[in-house]
Image: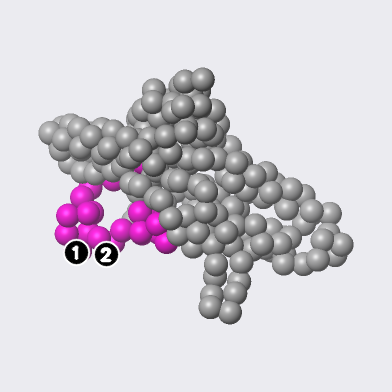
Amino acid sequence: MNILHIDSSPMFETSNSRKLSAMVVALLQERYPGCNILHKDLARDPPPHLTQDVYLAYRRPEAELTPQQRRERAVTDAHIEQFLASDIVVIGAPLYNLSLPTQLKAWIDRISQPGRTFRYAERGIVGLVSNVRVIVASSRGGLYSLSEEGRARDFQERYLLAALKTLGIAHIDIVRVEGVNMSADRRAEAYAKAQAAADDIVSSILASRPQWQRAALV
């Protein structure tokens, strides 16, 4: 089993999303000791943001690409290949100013390319990624999931779900800690709930793909 572990928070020592994503990956590693893990730290090595050359690199015939467009396509292809080679992608995603860190958005822009991860059809966009499962390790300092007002201001989890489903990904789980900046009690409660949720998710993966465990035991 191949696991792509993505972190995006620029807070290296105190990040809740990093702590949470590491917890999820550790659980997966414990259950599947033979798994392969690739860690991408988007804060330390951020993908370049979209430019005209990135956009045109997938929308012009290859023979017509400029040298810069070819270089941009090679960078994007590398991100896409890592993504498509993964069985499970764990995404550490903090909520910043109601949305995501820009480096995580830049990575999603890189992997969302026509002909590779989606295609245009008569009925709209068709996702091409069917064999990747995603676990989002979501962190919020405040509370957003418990009220209609909070959910309306959530452009973090809702965006991630929409963007990943557009690529065809059907299995997306969220492990969440929220309210962690409000009090020590809320923080402890949030992590206890997240630990239980992560345990359940990893167990469900085992139930749906038992061959991974058999392979790990060989």
Marks 1 and 2, how far apart in space? 6 Å
Q: Residue at x 42, y 61 (%)?
A: 162
Q: Residue at x 38, y 35 (%)?
A: 206
Q: Does the magenta stretch include residue 192?
A: no
Is 149 left, or right, of 84 in this rendering? left
Which sits in the foreground, 56 or 173? 173
**Residue reaching furthest to the right:** 63
Residue 11 rendering spot, x and y as whole percentages: 41, 34
Q: Label 1, on which residue?
A: 148
The reply to whether discs 1 and 2 touch (Cβ–Cβ < 8 Å) is yes
Residue 179 rendering spot, x and y as whole percentages: 21, 43
The residue range painted magenta reads 137-162
Q: Residue at x 55, y 54 (%)?
A: 129
Q: Residue flagged by tag 2: what amino acid is it?
A: Ala
**Number of the label disc, if any, that sits on residue 161:** none
Q: Which residue is drawn at 31% across and 58% down?
A: 154
**Disc 2 packing (10 Å; few <14; some 14–19; many ≥20):** few
Picture layout, residue 214 above or below residue 169 = above
**Number of the label disc, if any, that sits on residue 152:** 2
Residue 151 rendering spot, x and y as whole percentages: 25, 60
| SS label for mark 2 | helix
